[in-house]
Image (cartoon, grey):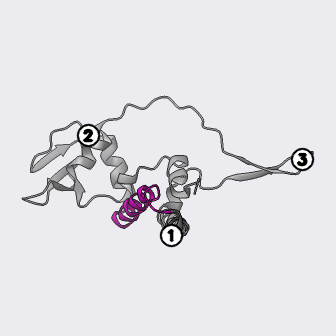
Amino acid sequence: MTKIEHQNFLKTNNLQVKLLLQPIQEKIEVFNRMYKLLEKVSDCEKGELIEELEALDLEISEDIEEEYADRLEYNDIIPVKTSEKKETELVKPLNVKKQPKKITDESILDELVKMGRTNDIGRSTFFDLGIKTVLGWTTIVGKYKIKRTSAFTYRYKIELN
């Protein structure tokens, strides 16, 4: 197994695993654990494990495409035929360089709201995304209010202020 489709898909479309829906994240974790076992398994069992990995990889890719198809930038790769060799080559759309946009806490929250991720967000997810504001029980960031929803774990929800 040399090519992992869902990882290529995430990389091509600039998606982060932490921003995916929880069931998809769990499938990716299971895939990663199974992939690590690939090195430790005997040759007899490798074939079965590779088949299971390929099936799970396909399932993850389909789930991601189904859930995020309307929001992806490069979900279509255009095949181009050359007249001399009659081979198909995959061509990716060119990335147009934009002016670097200053990323603020509010812009990160904007993106989370656009994606529909407003409930049950972990504190580590906020920090991984680059939130610099110290989070308390109720924290106001621009037009958003981040409220802690659990007393024993750091889980938050995003509301309009």
Q: Which residues are magenta?
A: 22-42
Residue linked to disc 3: 85
Q: Residues within 10 Å of mark 1 (few under 14, many from 20)?
A: some
Could you tell me if the residues under marks 1 and 3 are in contact, i.e. CB atoms within 8 Å?
no
- Furthest residue to the top? 99
**Left or right, 29 with reference to 145:** right
Q: CA distance from mark 2 to mark 3?
A: 51 Å
Vertically, is 132 above or below 19? above
Residue linked to disc 1: 52
Q: Residues within 10 Å of mark 3 (few under 14, many from 20)?
A: few
Label 1 or label 3, whichever lies nearer to me, is 1
Chain-order first, disc 2 or disc 3: 3
Kind of residue at disc 2: Ile
Q: Exactly how many numbered labels are in the figure?
A: 3
Write down the quadrant of residue 93 in the picture: top right
User: Who is closer to the viewer here, 158 or 15?
Assistant: 15
Q: Secondary structure at mark 3?
A: loop
Q: In the image, which disc is placed on residue 131?
A: 2
**Left or right, 111 with reference to 155:** right
Q: Is residue 105 visible?
A: yes
